[in-house]
Amino acid sequence: MNNTIPETPHNATPADILRTGVESAAGPVSLACSFSLEDVAIIDIAHQAEIKLGVFAIDTGRLHEETYEVAEALSERYRLKIDWYFPRHEAVEQLEREKGLFSFRESLENRHECCHIRKVEPLSRALDGLKGWVTGMRREQSVTRNELQAIERDDLNGGIFKINPLIDWSEETLLAYTIERRLPKNRLFDLGYRSIGCAPCTRAVKPGEDARAGRWWWENPEHKECGLHRR
């Protein structure tokens, strides 16, 4: 893999960013797909631009039914192969036996523990052997993401490239693209769920709140990451 992070011009399109990142990685690259509007758009962009991109998903064991519906719709529309990863069942069993089903609401430490078991550890297996991974993160989403770069080096995951093709898209742009392309959309989005994760940790946002305000709503905004995107 090329050790130099490629530069992208300010007017680069998502397809430009995606192609530059994939070509610079010089090896397998996959999208970490949560079946959000962003991830669905990236799959469609890659498909149209004929950019070779793998797709993996992490089934935490607590996803909404509506999320699985999007996964099925994508598989059918694009003949898409999704590589699913799951938490180690022994770790989940131990956590729930020792701390119960909702320990993540008791403290930030407990929430990080749950996220590590259900998301971070499976991610490490999903990224094994990859030269880069793609996310649907946007700068506009929250205060934890306003310093994102189009292509970054993920030093916490072996120094592989982390490609964020939609960083400059607004939610308005994303919605317009979704409608124009008639993309599959999680039914919860129209009920106010603008960022959808595990069912017990996700709620609809209130007017004026940012997109990720409904994630771990009992925590301060600067803490609202699960560990997949540590900086």
Image: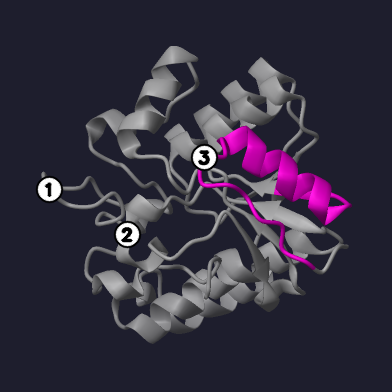
Q: Which amino acid does label 1 sit on?
A: Gly
**How far across and how far down the image is residue 174, in percent?**
40, 31
Foreground of the two, 43 or 113: 43
Relative horizontal placement of residue 214, taking residue 74 as reference (left or right): left
Residue 207 appears in the figure: yes
* Contact? badges 1 and 2 (CB < 8 Å): no
Tell whether position 6 is magenta. Answer: yes
Q: Is residue 219 above or below residue 148?
A: below
Tell whether position 144 is magenta. Answer: no
Magenta stretch? 4-30
Q: In terms of sequence position, does the residue under pointer 3 or pointer 1 come before the other?
A: 3
How far apart are labels 3 and 1 at the CA level?
29 Å
Q: Which of the two marks, 3 or 1, is nearer to us in this view? A: 3
Q: What residue type is labelled 3?
A: Asn
Residue in the picture at 23% in, 38% down: 192
Residue 88 appears in the figure: no
Relative horizontal placement of residue 167, taking residue 87 as reference (left or right): left
Q: Which mark is residue 19?
A: none
Which element carries disc 2, helix, strand or loop?
loop
Q: Residue 142 carries which label?
A: 2
Q: Which mark is residue 208?
A: 1
Q: In terms of sequence position, does the residue under pointer 2 or pointer 3 come before the other?
A: 3
Q: Residue 11 carries which label?
A: 3
Foreground of the two, 104 or 206: 206
Which element carries disc 3, helix, strand or loop?
loop
**How far across and how far down the image is residue 162, in percent?**
66, 59
Residue in the picture at 58% in, 72% down: 117
Residue farthest left in this picture: 207
**How far across and how far down the image is residue 180, in percent?**
43, 14
Q: In this view, does 49 lie above or below 217?
A: above
